[in-house]
Each structure stands twice: as structure tokens, then as C-alpha cells.
Image (spheres, helix red, strand yellow):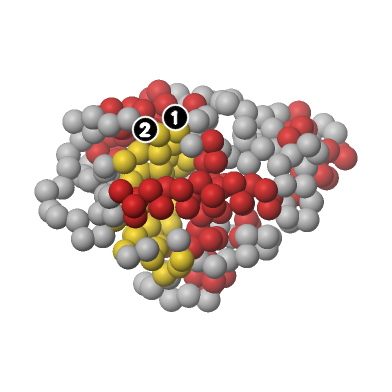
Amino acid sequence: MLARENKALTVANIYLLRHGKVRGEAALYGHTDVAVDSSVDEDIIKQLTLLNLDIDVFYTSPLQRCAQLADKISQQYQRCAKSLAGLKEMNFGRYDGVAFDTLYQNSQVWQQLERFWINPAKHSLPHAEELTTFACRVINAWRLIVDDLLKKSPHSNILVVCHGGVIRMILAQLLNVDYRQAKWYTQLTIANGSLTTIEVNNGQCRVKNIAKPLVNGLYNKNSAVESNNELVDLLSLETDKITVGSV
């Protein structure tokens, strides 16, 4: 069983864990239900164990790359993970799950992808979920998690296993960032197996750290500093005071 802290909680922490690297060729994996090798999950669990986090409640995207990891972790805490459809990754439509090597063969398709990467709010993919729709879905799921926390157990810690796009949308909400701006996608990386920590105190959320990779059970500070500084520049925030935002 994973170790648990004994100290009394005065505030709650919500940990956003991105799933491990998926099997298969490089592609936009949104609603495509691709798997992660069990060895990758086990490595994440091992690293997470060494952090000695006290976790009381577990949420997960229903897609197997998240759900399988969440189930394994929650079982070691003798808990069950709650699945929320709102935590699914964005649906990339016609190109969801199609290998980039295949899409690259068609120059018109590749140009569509390039326009989407530069400005996803302006250039949607065919039959894909609109960025605004995705944002609303994710924020509704986030509010459900926080509302449940505040009503039932305001001092509980929560682990949410989800996707890079989902974490990005939650951060945009908390940091008061316009998620439609292109720089939010080109200057912020949410790596596989990274952990974002949000502190909840009296209904206010404070982002403590963003997308820090887990290495040997510790935050790999050196690999996170540059991306965090870029984010701070983007948001015009001070590095050591990463903001308080509304739920």
C-alpha cells in the first residue's frame, strides 16, 4: 500500500496527473481509446509512491490510458476511482488517432493540421470537437470535482488522472488565461507522466506547480524551470507566486 502522511490537513490539494506515453505511432490521440504499456504505468506508480502523497479521492477520464492507471493507483490506497466523461481529451474528429506519417502524405490534410496547431480556436479540424465546446466540458467537470470536495470533504486530497489538453484547460481557467490564444498551445507543454498541483483553500485555488515530471519519486526541477519561466513570461506573473484563481 502506498505510504500516507499522518499530519492533519488544513487545505486540500488536487493533483492533476497526465497519463503515460501511449502505444502506437505519433498521432493526435483524442477520443481514440489507445492503451499505455503496463510497464509505463508501473514506472509512474513507483515514482508517485516515493512522493508519499496523502490521497483520499480519485477521478479519471474513462479512456483506458487514464482509467487503467487510476485504477491501479487507487487500489493501492484501497479506494475506487470515479470516472468522469467530461475529463476525456478533445475529440480531433476525422484525424483522431490517424498516424502523422499517414496524414503527411496528403499535403492539404497536413496544411489543415498545421493551421490547427498554430491556432486551434480559429482552425477546427473536420468533424472535430470545437475548442469552446471542449473548454466548457472540461470546466464543468472541474467544477463538479471542486464542488464535491467543498461540500463533502474540504480537507481531502484528490488525484485526477487525465490528459494534457484537459490539464491545459483547467490551468487556463485558474490562471485567467484566454485559452483561445495560440501561445497557450505553443509555449506550454504538459508532458506524459507529469504532475500539476493545485491547492484549494476556502474555495480559492492556487496553482502550486505546473507539469513537473516525476523522476525517482521527486520533481525534476531542472526540466521544469524553463517551461515554467516561459509560462510566467506569457502570463506576466512572478515565478514564485503562481497565482490564485477562482474555482
In this view, the mark in front (2 or 1): 2
Q: Which residue is mark 1?
A: 67
Residue drawn at x 26%, y 43% as measured from the top left: 55
- Could you say which is closer to the camera, residue 153 or residue 173? 153
Residue drawn at x 49%, y 70% as measured from the top left: 232
- Could you say which is closer to the camera, residue 146 or residue 31? 146
Res. 151 mark: none
Q: Is residue 169 above or below residue 112?
A: below
Residue drawn at x 40%, y 34% as measured from the top left: 82
Q: Which residue is mark 2?
A: 81
The kind of secondary structure element at disc 2 is strand
Sequence-first disc among 2 and 1:
1
Residues at discs 2 and 1 in contact (Cβ within 8 Å): yes
Looking at the rendered image, the quarter that the N terminus falls into is: top left
Question: Whole-percent x and y of residue 206?
Answer: 38, 65
Count of marks, rendered view: 2
Question: Distance between the Cα atoms at labels 2 and 1?
Answer: 8 Å
Question: Whole-percent x and y of residue 51?
Answer: 24, 46
Q: Please name the amino acid that badge 1 sits on.
A: Ala
Residue drawn at x 43%, y 57% as measured from the top left: 210
Relative to 192, 185 lies left or right: right
- Mark 2 neighbour class, 10 Å CA radius: few under 14, some 14 to 19, many 20 or more: many
Observer able to see residue 224: no
Q: Please name the amino acid that badge 2 sits on.
A: Ala
